[in-house]
Amino acid sequence: EVELLLSPLYRPFSKPPAGPLLDRKALETLKRPQRERIHLMGGLNAKRIAPLLAGRFAGYSLMGAWLHEPENLLAQLVQVISENDPAS
């Protein structure tokens, strides 16, 4: 089984820029109808994962968003997931 961690999708909130960003158009080619073992990280927040949810990626890292706006993040995630997750 292959598992991938792809980063950074956006400029991280928690550290200075370090290298090129992932190509978002190329990332579209990785979207599948079944959940894949592909994890995304780098500058993600609730708003930025909304269009990614349909891609059925395995996971998302939101550490920088949590450090940046912890008081709002969980409520925003619940809203985004309920509005965009094809499984719900």
Image (cartoon, rainbow, N blue to C red):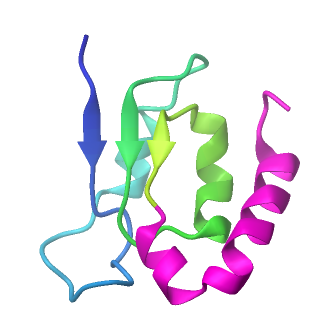
Above or below for 68 versus 84:
below
Is residue 66 on the magenta stretch? yes
Q: Residue furthest top?
A: 1
Foreground of the two, 86 or 60: 60
Residue occupying the point 25% across, 85% down? 15
In the rendered structure, the answer to whether residue 72 lies left or right of residue 55 reads: right
Is residue 1 on the magenta stretch? no
Q: Position of residue 80 (x, y in %)?
A: 78, 58
Q: How many marks?
A: 0
Above or below for 55 versus 35:
below
Residue occupying the point 17% across, 70% down? 20
Looking at the figure, which quarter contains the C terminus? top right
In the rendered structure, the answer to whether residue 49 lies left or right of residue 80 reads: left
Q: Main secondary structure of the magenta part?
A: helix
Residue occupying the point 48% across, 65% down? 62
Above or below for 8 versus 85:
below
Foreground of the two, 14 or 30: 14
| Residue 70 picture quarter | bottom right
Above or below for 51 versus 43:
above
Residue occupying the point 61% across, 19% down? 33
In the rendered structure, the answer to whether residue 85 lies left or right of residue 15 reads: right
Looking at the figure, which quarter contains the N terminus? top left
Q: Position of residue 45 (x, y in %)?
A: 57, 70
The magenta stretch is 62-88
Q: Position of residue 47 (x, y in %)?
A: 67, 69
